[in-house]
Image: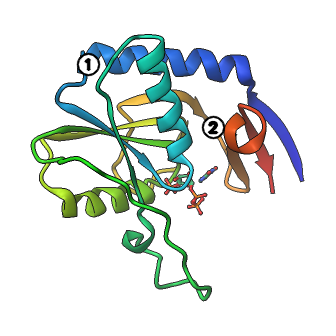
């Protein structure tokens, strides 16, 4: 197994600030916008962006939730092992809200498809956008594209992108791992 650094901590930090600014450009004070981090790994990115928006850009009332998509995946009946769901935590109404889904990697688009189904149980939002740190180019199985992307990368099929967060993985970094 070999691995190559795609983004180091400094580059991740610059990208996070750019993404935060792009969100502000569209959503202003976030009075009608909610952020939803997708479990399991989108929540680290959602937490970090929320922290930057609050602390560096003084946006006060950001509503942040976490959405688990385990049982909405189109492959969930295929695996043999028992599936363990993560926590969904959405303590606000999404009815008529602008939602920004946040995930670390966009690959086939199937996770986002599942999230679009899962969120329907919480109401009818006004619109849903997608923010992703890494957009794997030319690998979509569905017509799903990000509205905000950190970095687009070309990845061949036997390679995997791994996003690390200091809170969970001891460093902020993105690696390309050859399996
Ligand atoms: O666009 P997709 O093909 O759905 O892939 C993207 C998803 O894959 C990763 O999750 P995870 O490692 O939990 O899922 P995986 O097993 O599908 O790689 C990542 O955090 C995204 O949520
Ligand atoms: O490269 C990939 C593909 C799907 N999910 C990841 O986390 N990385």
Question: Is residue 15 left or right of 54 when viewed as pictured?
Answer: right
Secondary structure of the residue carrying tag 1 is helix
Q: Is residue 157 visible?
A: yes
Residue occupying image coordinates x 28% and y 50% = 91
Residue 65 % position (x, y): 36, 46
Q: CA distance from mark 1 to mark 2?
A: 28 Å
Residue occupying image coordinates x 29% and y 26% = 61
Residue carrying label 1: 26
Residue occupying image coordinates x 47% and y 76% = 75
Indicate the quadrant containing the C terminus: top left, top right, bottom left or bottom right: bottom right
Secondary structure of the residue carrying tag 2 is loop
Q: Check the image and report above or below for 124 versus 60.
A: below
Indicate the quadrant containing the N terminus: top left, top right, bottom left or bottom right: bottom right
Residue 159 % position (x, y): 73, 51
Residue carrying label 2: 154
Residue 122 % position (x, y): 20, 58
Question: Is residue 131 left or right of 126 when viewed as pictured?
Answer: right
Residues 145 and 60: in front is 60
């Amino acid at each position: 197994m070999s691995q190559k650094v795609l983004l180091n901590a400094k580059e991740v930090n610059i990208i996070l600030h750019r993404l935060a600014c792009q969100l502000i450009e569209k959503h202003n004070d976030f009075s009608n916008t909610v952020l939803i981090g997708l479990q399991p790994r989108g929540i680290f990115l959602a937490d970090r962006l929320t922290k930057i928006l609050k602390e560096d850009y003084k946006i006060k009332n950001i509503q942040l939730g976490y959405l688990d998509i385990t049982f909405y995946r189109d492959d969930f009946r295929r695996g043999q092992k028992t599936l363990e769901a993560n926590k969904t935590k959405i303590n606000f109404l999404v009815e008529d809200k602008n939602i920004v889904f946040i995930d670390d990697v966009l690959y086939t688009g199937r996770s986002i498809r599942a999230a679009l189904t899962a969120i329907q149980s919480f109401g009818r939002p006004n619109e849903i956008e997608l923010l992703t740190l890494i957009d794997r180019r030319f690998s979509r199985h569905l017509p799903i594209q990000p509205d905000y992307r950190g970095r687009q990368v070309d990845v061949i099929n036997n390679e995997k992108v791994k996003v690390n967060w200091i809170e969970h993985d001891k460093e902020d970094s993105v690696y390309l791992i050859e399996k």
